[in-house]
Image (spheres, helix red, strand yellow):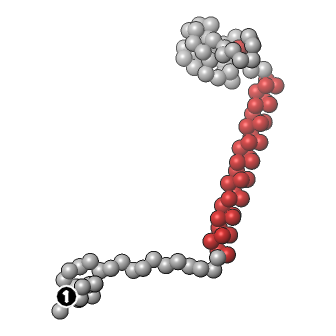
Amino acid sequence: MSENETPICPACRRPLLTRFAKLCCYCGAALPAELLLAPEQKAEIERRELLEWRQRQEEAEERAKEKKGARSSSGTTIQMPPRLNRNPHSSSTLGGHGT
């Protein structure tokens, strides 16, 4: 089997969803060892995925720090205006029609 070929379950003839699982995800049949990833291949993939995950975590933490720093270093606080009182019977409405 070449690297580009998708392995097929010998029992149900469907393409394997993963080469990590020892059983077919469709029919549950035990898969022969030659269709599975070698332990060294699994370890390399897991190591690479862990490194990528750590890098994404560090980048996310950096962005969060930058965002927090940008907020606190500006010195300007933007305040939203208070809501207008929309009660037509109140004397403090925008139109001033109260008693």
Which residue in the structure is indicated by mark 1? 97
- Above or below 83: residue 9: above
The spot of residue 13 in percent (x, y) is 58, 8
Count the numbered circles shown. Answer: 1
Q: Quadrant of residue 33?
A: top right
- Locate the C terminus and report the quarter of the image it occupies: bottom left
Given residues 98 and 23, the one toward you in this image is: 98
- Above or below 88: residue 69: above
Q: Secondary structure at mark 1?
A: loop
Given residues 73 and 43, the one toward you in this image is: 73
Given residues 74 and 55, the one toward you in this image is: 74
- Locate the N terminus and report the quarter of the image it occupies: top right
The spot of residue 48 in percent (x, y) is 77, 36
The spot of residue 67 in percent (x, y) is 65, 65
Q: Quadrant of residue 2?
A: top right
Q: For the residue carrying disc 1, how many other residues have a C-alpha within 10 Å: few (<14), some (14-19), or many (20+)?
A: few
Going by the image, does 76 lie left or right of 97?
right
Which residue does the image show at 63% across and 11% down from the upper left? 8
Which residue does the image show at 33% across and 79% down from the upper left? 84
Going by the image, does 73 lie left or right of 78?
right
Residue found at the very far right of the displayed protein: 40
Going by the image, does 14 lie left or right of 4?
left
Residue found at the very far front of the displayed protein: 95
Q: Amino acid at mark 1?
A: His
Which residue does the image show at 79% across and 25% down from the upper left? 41
The spot of residue 24 in percent (x, y) is 60, 16
Residue found at the very far bottom of the displayed protein: 99
Which residue does the image show at 57% across and 20% down from the upper left? 25
Given residues 52 and 10, the one toward you in this image is: 52
